[in-house]
Amino acid sequence: MSAAAGKPMKLAYWPGCVSRGFTPELHGSMALVADRLEIELVTLDRANCSGAGVIAEHNQELADTLNARTFALAQETGLAMMNICSTCQGAQSECQERLDADSAYRAHINEALADEGISYEKDKAGFENKNFLWVLVEDYGLERLRALVTRPLSGLRVGPFYGCYVIRPRHRIGYEEHPERDLYLEYVIEALGGEPVEYDGARKCCGFPVITMNRDTSLRQAGTHVGDALDQGADCLVTPCPLCHLNLDMQQPEAAKVVNRDLGLGILHLPQLVGLALGFEPKQLGMNTHIASTRWVEERLGSQTAAA
């Protein structure tokens, strides 16, 4: 997937469901940022939901068929594939591991795709599936990103929130080859001129997976993580996962009641944070649509710009 320094990139783009449903500001900000970074996104409009791990719990073969179909559509473009949902990255990585490990099972799954004239091929040259965070660090390059920053995030203290699916299980998602993937958000924050904030919840579950089964536990997890970040002086959090964003942002007012404290911390999608540093205005990036206000982030950056 790597591109030579200064050369445009072209990727098969799988936005997933949530970025075009509950969090359209993520899909919109990704489009703006990609254009500024000279990354051409070939959207896989006919691709389907990854199942987010939920479908696999009930019908693994169905989940694998759905994801194999998406992989096959991406392989038809001849490009590597990029996603903007780390939950989907985890679900798809799990599926791909099963498909690649068993040729007979892979052939069986491909039978279901035959009517469309497509099939998923193991080890097809040029094909891999990466979250936008991984693409930024491993393929686009931090130095190249840093060179495009027009509004350094100086003075902005940003808490990274990885969630679950881009950091575990490590054997499934490429940590043998890329052992520092659980530090990439910090690397990006620093490249954009911001200050990463260490806090206890950065690599824990946001609570979203249990929101329908145990709402109190889910909200307590989200509220605790946001509170921990506030206690360490964070001005905002940034996450590569729209499902984490839903629990940390949309549910934040309810989470505040559960943990019995004021919260009010802005939660940014990764492309939004990148977009701010590249010079886009908060409204262009859809930050005005969030539940938890991002006004403090705007004021913080505004005051830093005025001082400079």
Image: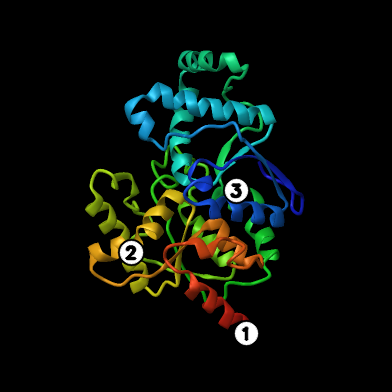
Mark 1–mark 2 Cα distance, whole angstroms, equals 32 Å
Which numbered mark, 1 or 2, is in the foreground of this view? Answer: 2
* Amino acid on which disc 1 is placed: Ala
Q: Earlier in the sequence, mark 2 or mark 3?
A: 3
* Mark 1 residue element: helix
Q: For the residue carrying disc 3, how many other residues have a C-alpha within 10 Å: few (<14), some (14-19), or many (20+)? A: some
* Amino acid on which disc 3 is placed: Val
In percent of width and height, residue 160 lies at 45, 61
Which corner quadrant holds the C terminus? bottom right
Given residues 170 and 306, the one toward you in this image is 306
Is residue 250 among the parts visible in the rendering? yes
> Which numbered tag is attached to residue 50?
none
Q: Earlier in the sequence, mark 1 or mark 2?
A: 2
In the rendered image, which residue does mark 2 sit on? 253
In percent of width and height, residue 99 lies at 48, 23
Mark 1–mark 3 Cα distance, whole angstroms, equals 33 Å
Q: Quarter of the image holding residue 80?
A: top right
Which corner quadrant holds the N terminus? top right
Mark 2–mark 3 Cα distance, whole angstroms, equals 33 Å
Q: Are marks 1 and 3 in contact (CB under 8 Å)?
A: no
* Mark 2 residue element: helix
In the rendered image, which residue does mark 1 sit on? 306
Q: Residue at x 56, y 61 (%)?
A: 286
In percent of width and height, residue 74 lies at 62, 31
Residue at the far bottom in the pictured view:
307
> Which numbered tag is attached to residue 135?
3
Q: Are marks 2 and 3 in contact (CB under 8 Å)?
A: no
Q: Are marks 1 and 2 in contact (CB under 8 Å)?
A: no
Determine whether 297 is above or below 290 in the image.
below
Given residues 274 and 115, the one toward you in this image is 115
Residue at the far right in the pictured view:
7
